Amino acid sequence: MNFVLLNGKKYPLDANCTLLKLIENLGITHKAMAVAINMQVIKKSLWESYVLQNGDEIEILDFVGGG
């Protein structure tokens, strides 16, 4: 089985898994966020078609408002 590093932790990866599918599997599709893969920010419009690769380093960031 393949793996990615998700926010610094090893996470199993299914074959041909897209970025959107990963986010759906994590149950966080409702949050506004930014995603970087291997230090490259991926536009939200590309999440559905971006196929993850074994060993990708993924950072998912939530936006937190405050005052």
Image (cartoon, helix red, strand yellow):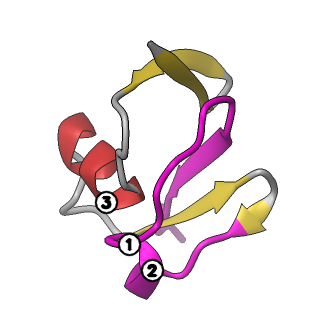
Identify the magenta region.
Answer: 41-67
Judging by the rendered image, the residue that carries numbered circle 1 is 49
Kind of residue at disc 2: Leu
Res. 20 mark: 3
Mark 3: secondary structure: helix
Q: Residue at x 51, y 20 (%)?
A: 2
- At a point 54% along the width and 54% down the height, the residue shown is 61
Q: Residue at x 76, y 66 (%)?
A: 40
Mark 3: give few (<14), some (14-19) or many (20+) Cα within 10 Å.
some
Residue at the spot of label 2: 46
On whether residue 54 falls in the magenta region, the answer is yes
Up the image or down, 7 lies above or below 34; here it is above
**Number of numbered discs overlaid on the protein picture:** 3
Q: Is the residue 53 above or below the residue 37 in the image? A: above
Mark 1: secondary structure: loop
Tell me if residue 27 can be seen. Answer: no
Q: Are marks 2 and 3 in contact (CB under 8 Å)?
A: no
Expressed as whole percent of the image width and height from the top left, the position of residue 44 reads: 43, 79
* Of the pair 52 and 33, the residue shown nearer to us: 52
Q: CA distance from mark 1 to mark 2?
A: 6 Å
Quarter of the figure with the C terminus: bottom right
Relative to 60, 8 lies left or right? right
Residue plotted at (68% across, 24% down): 8
Location of residue 22 by image quarter: top left
Please state which of residues 24 and 28 is positioned toward the viewer in this rendering: 24
Q: Secondary structure at mark 2?
A: helix
- Is 60 above or below relative to 46? above
* Tag 3: amino acid: Leu
Asked if residue 7 can be seen in this view, the reply is: yes
Residue 31 locus on image (x, y percent): 28, 62
Q: Nearer the viewer, residue 56 or 41?
A: 56
